Image (cartoon, rainbow, N blue to C red):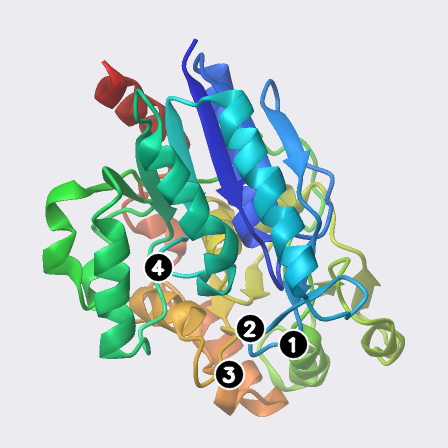
Amino acid sequence: MNRVLFHVQHLLGIGHVRRAAVLARTLAASGFDVLLVSGGAPLKLDLGRARFHQLPPVRARDEGLRELCQLDGAPLDDAFRADRRRVLLDLLAAERPDIVITEQFPFGRTQLHFELLPLLEAARAMMPKPLIVSSVRDVVRRTARPERIAETLGLLDDFDLVLIHADPRLADFAKSFAGWDGIARRAVYTGYVGESVPATRTQAGAGEVIVSVGGGAVGAPLLKAALGARAASAAAERTWRLLLGDNLADVDRAALPKAAGIVIERARSDFTTLLSNAALSISQAGYNTVVETLCCADRAVLVPFATERETEQNDRARMLAERGMVAMVPADELSAGSLAAAVDRALAGPSIRSFPPCDVRGAAATAELLQARLA
């Protein structure tokens, strides 16, 4: 049985590790012996037959994502970094994998050079050398400096394969990664990676407006705007259901007022059922949420999380809005008024279901691609 060591690090939201868990579970179900190694805050994950190892966890200090810290806010010192590096290299030596996968690296996660560069060096020195694979989303940070692009291309010389988890009919990776010509020969589109969507068995959320913020770490502005937008929108008579996410700060949670026609609750396990039954979805534009929206929702408004440095959600939302599939409110234009106007545009526009379905077989395709490469 071929072994896979899969490294993933989530910093602010939980999208990276959720997608990695789907991939790990699918690879394990396809006959691989998978060890998923996570460096973020511990989460409950459905891994199927895959195994799991938790590194000493770190997170982003703030929304800028530039600096890492321990979960309690303590800075990372040399001893902490050395411990993480030792654990990771010991796992590599013990597992002797046939495949090493890094999630998002080297397109991102540069703060983890202290452990990932030694991991790559040790993997290259193994006999036989494992297949070294980068697993990356549909878009990457477009604001990367030219020297950062050159650094990425240099690191990718050590990779045998770049798996782009997207449908090329929707997402052109070259538009966000300026070094595309340098990786095109080893890059493969897999289709989007998403959870299997169960058939709708209840009427939960029927006719509602579902407002979701993923894990919730940066969702407070959208929730606040939604509360103000309802009365001014064409959906004023509908129930608006706000799903908060476990990482929404307590102070932001407490600031949400109760009002008629508004349901406020924690994120639910039947989220895709709610989407399938709802009149409209309002959400941020994280990878997993967008995939679920494309698979399940009738109409949608996307409000991407964005900073000067972080452009990924904005680019993902814009590529869908330009095709007329969703309405969009840029983060720097978000207000109750702009959100109400976007709701009206979405309700008056075409259904997402009227467009050709996107390819969401990314997990199964990844397993097939890796099996073929090893063969």
Q: In this view, does 304 lie to the left or right of 56?
A: left
Determine if residue 34 is in view.
no
**Identity, as a three-letter code, of the amino acid under mark 1:** Asp
Q: What percent of the width, then of the height, locates residue 19?
A: 51, 43
Q: Nearer the viewer, residue 348 or 69?
A: 69
Q: Nearer the viewer, residue 178 or 324?
A: 178
Q: Report helix, strand or loop for mark 1.
A: loop
Pointer 4 residue: 107
Pointer 1 residue: 62
**Identity, as a three-letter code, of the amino acid under mark 3:** Ala
**Identity, as a three-letter code, of the amino acid under mark 4:** Phe
Point 36% across, 70% down: residue: 141
> Quarter of the image containing the C terminus?
top left
Asked if disc 1 and disc 3 are in contact, CB closer than 8 Å, the reply is no
Q: Report helix, strand or loop for mark 2.
A: loop
Q: What percent of the width, then of the height, locates residue 152?
A: 28, 61
Distance of label 1 from label 4 (alpha carbons): 20 Å
